[in-house]
Image (cartoon, grey):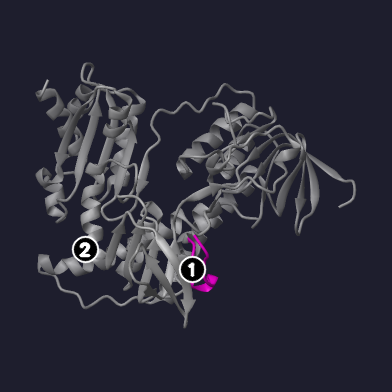
Amino acid sequence: MGDLVREVDVAVVGGGPGGYTAAFRCAELGLETVVVDDGKRLGGVCLFEGCVPSKALLHAAALIDQAGQAAELGIEFGPPRVSLDLLRKWVSERVVGTLARGLAAAARAKGVEVLGGRAVFEGPRQLRVEGDEPQKIRFAHALVATGSAPLAPPGSAPARERVMDPSAALALPEVPERLLVIGGGYVGLEIGMVYAAIGSAVTLVETTDNLLPGVDRDLVRPLARRVGSRFAAVHLGTRVGEWAERDGRVEARLGGAAPQSFDRVLVAEGRRARSDGIGLETTAVRTDAGGAIAVDDRCRTDESRIYAVGDVTGEPMLAHRAMRQGVVAAEAMAGRPAAFDTVAVPAVVFTDPEIAWCGLGEQEAGRAGRPVRVATVPWAASGRAATLGRADGLTKLVLDPESGRVLGVGIVGPGASELIAEGALAVEAALTAEDLAATVHPHPTRSETLMEAAAAFLRGR
């Protein structure tokens, strides 16, 4: 390594959505920028092991379900047959590979260099790169975008080849006859639905009394009904007790019941900020008990030259939050006025049906003692939902009772992930029910339900 030290304007640690978005914006603003990433690639867990592969597989699962439902329309297909090799190839080459090549091309076009290796801070102005390209980098500013890692499985885990984290599960090692999913959050539900569609008998265990803890119950209810019909079993308010591998299978005790046997186990009980082992102790950067880095509204840490974005800064751990933070941090490092003061960061669960929400929830308002009015439109009244054979959705507005301002939006149903953008805009721009009701929406579409919910609120005033 020697004494050679490279000097740059910005060193970005981590090539995920927050990291590459910040790097690209820094380059656009004229700052010499390098990205240090373990895999010497841009996209991070989101592209290679998480968000994108899971959505690709959920699309495949939806096609399988639609083929089965087509008989109701008088269209008959033979039973779907899944080729895991071709499905893996489609995800890795046609989806992930295409997007990865696009990011690499964008980096070259913008003059952003990507270094392979592990970055470790040696102080508030310098870091070393360990690995195939060892060197030292002195920076004017640095950005930490190291993301998060899955929480370890509970209790004493059996042999690892039978127990999968979400990344391993999305690699589709096989179609287990019986799959145990530990965790009823969005990851467990999404991946569980994929495996159920391709032929596994899925048993889900959640320690709380509800699927998707913390999410509006009105939104979760249609999903819970569908999960109940797709999974072999759902155990709420249940913990996994003793478990061990025997004869190539995992035996696990669910609550106080007798042990059950599973071919594989998916542990999906959340994620933890990945801030350990990167030398932050040599700086003034402060982390909490969960490893999350504390930042201000400019995404700046307690060390004035070091910024942080994305999962490593804590909840909500969402790629689109990281990307917006990345833009804010880049502009702040360039000396521009910028702040992460976003009111509405939408969240989406890409199950079937999808659930999406943003802003203030009804239960949250109740806990805070804030008076609100709620307007809901069941999709049974939607002409477009009827034409799709999916009337199991719901659109919900949370509004200020006096001004009619839209404070929160929740949607459950196919396509909720796309529809929530209008809700996020309404909350962010402080639109009112009158604004939504007076905006002409195309007919017949599911987007009309936002307009109709707003009109329902106005009629009830």
Dot 1: what SS?
A: strand
Task: Name which residue lies at 10% across and 43% down.
Answer: 381
Query: Measured from the top left, where is residue 149 in percent x and y?
Result: 55, 52
Disc 2 packing (10 Å; few <14; some 14–19; many ≥20): few
Looking at the image, is mark 1 or mark 2 nearer the viewer?
A: 1
- Image quadrant assignment for residue 95: bottom left
Give residue 385's mark. Answer: none
Asked whether residue 89 appears in the rendered view, the answer is no
Residue at left offset 70%, top offset 46%: 278
Which amino acid type is marked by label 2? Ser
Residue 156 among magenta residues? yes
- Reply yes or no: does residue 157 show up in magenta: yes
- According to the picture, the residue beneath numbered tag 2 turns out to be 229
The stretch in magenta equals: 155-165
For label 1, the crowd category at 10 Å Cα-Cα, with few meaning under 14, some 14 to 19 and many 20 or more, is: many
> What's the residue at 69%, 30% (across, down)?
303
- Give the distance between the C-alpha atoms of the residues marked 1 and 2, in whole angstroms: 25 Å
Residue most toward the top?
A: 402
- The secondary structure type at the circle numbered 2 is helix
> Can residue 43 be seen in this snapshot?
yes
The amino acid sitting under disc 1 is Val
Q: Residue furthest bottom?
A: 247
Q: Position of residue 202 (x, y in %)?
A: 32, 68
Q: Is residue 125 left or right of residue 302?
A: right
Which residue is most to the front? 256
Q: What residue is shown with label 1?
A: 163
Residue 281, image x, y percentages: 72, 39
- Residue 250 locus on image (x, y percent): 44, 74
In the image, is residue 261 above or below residue 286? below
